[in-house]
Image (cartoon, helix red, strand yellow):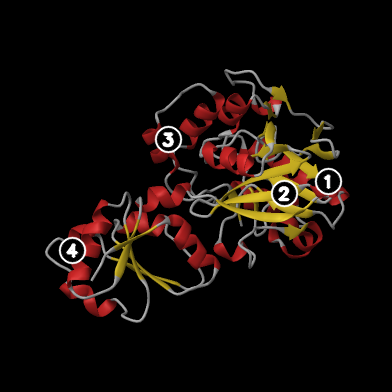
Amino acid sequence: MTVNAMTSTEVTKKILNNENLFILDVRNESDFQDWKIEGENVEHLNIPYFELLDGVEEILKKIPKDKEVLVVCAKEGSSVMVAEMLSEQDLDVSYLQGGMKAWSEHLEPVKIGDLKDGGEIYQFVRIGKGCLSYMVISGGEAAIIDATRMTEVFIEFAQNKNVNITHVLDTHLHADHISGGRKIAEQTNAVYWLPPKDATEVTFAYAPLEDGNVITIGNTAIDIHALYSPGHTIGSTSFIVDEKYLLSGDILFVDSIGRPDLAGLAEDWVGDLRETLYSRYKNLSEELIVLPAHFMIMDELNEDGSISEKLGTLFAENHGLNIESEEEFRKLVTENLPPQPNAYQEIRETNMGKINPDLEKQREMEIGPNRCAVR
């Protein structure tokens, strides 16, 4: 039987289409338990590669013949070898091209909606890591919010849309992934915006993003209004786009809320987080569609693969927005938190411009799930 390579794009389509997929993951058990490919109709079998060096005969009964089978490892090599062994046993299998490193980097653009006078807003779903980036397009110009380090995806998308990137913004100084914002701005001569309270240690020039800023994209007056909303970081800033969308950064997610501890200041920032969620956001229209910077579980995906929900719905259903007791809220966001993101201190320093790791090091720093939320 032929062994085929399956790309991250193809795997993403299968997950979004709720297709059946059986994954043989040959990474170590700890890596598998920490982070895996997930989907509504995805089944897993985790057998570490070193247990298969003498052959695959003992696991043949565990592998279905009526479902598509994908072998997955960290970088690709081990999955190719296991897939070839299974193929020799007359099984039709594929391997994940580029392994989990490629899965971590895949971005899937999804159109969120139309804006005034022909504008559009797109969400870029980093399905393997839970990061969400955005592009607002209007009048031949584009703004990018919370870009990942895979900068070529955004630049090529803008080129295909025949628009110029004029503004790049980060809602806060990220700790779970390396921002591509500054690099995109340098390559496109765009203005790079960063909240100044998060930028006290950065080594580069930036435009200070502050409460009340109005950044106009194109000639059709689609404004991005900045809304100071501390809590995840002291400088966290939300954006209201076209009076319709609330880009909430890492403050509010569909199924959870942001954690305040990634700069070591949880006790200091928990009050800011509560005030942002329970006061600042409460004063906004419940009709605003919340577009967060991350998602945590696959259940948060809509049928089209996007992640969004009305603010009013979140105030009704999101547990983090319905804790009356301030003490209970404080405990939720400061105690029993999930593990902090891998290499988060190095990622913060990279985003400050203090260190400049090579590409392979950056990939290693980002491996694993995002952990910016508390539930």
Q: Which residue is mark 1?
A: 242
Q: Position of residue 331 (x, y in %)?
A: 64, 51
**Amino acid on which disc 3 is placed:** Gln
Q: Position of residue 7 (x, y in %)?
A: 41, 56
Q: Position of residue 227 (x, y in %)?
A: 80, 38
Q: Position of residue 268 (x, y in %)?
A: 67, 35
Residue 234 in view of the camera = no
- Which part of the image, by quadrant, shows the N terminus? bottom left
Q: Residues within 10 Å of mark 4 (few under 14, many from 20)?
A: some
- Disc 3, SS: helix
**Amino acid on which disc 1 is placed:** Asp
| Residue toward you, 140 or 207 | 140
Alpha carbon distance from label 4 to label 1: 55 Å
Marks 3 and 4: in contact by CB < 8 Å? Answer: no
**Amino acid on which disc 4 is placed:** Leu
- Of the image marks 4 and 3, the number of the one nearer the N terminus: 4
Q: Which mark is residue 337?
A: none
Alpha carbon distance from label 4 to label 3: 30 Å
- Of the image marks 4 and 1, the number of the one nearer the N terminus: 4
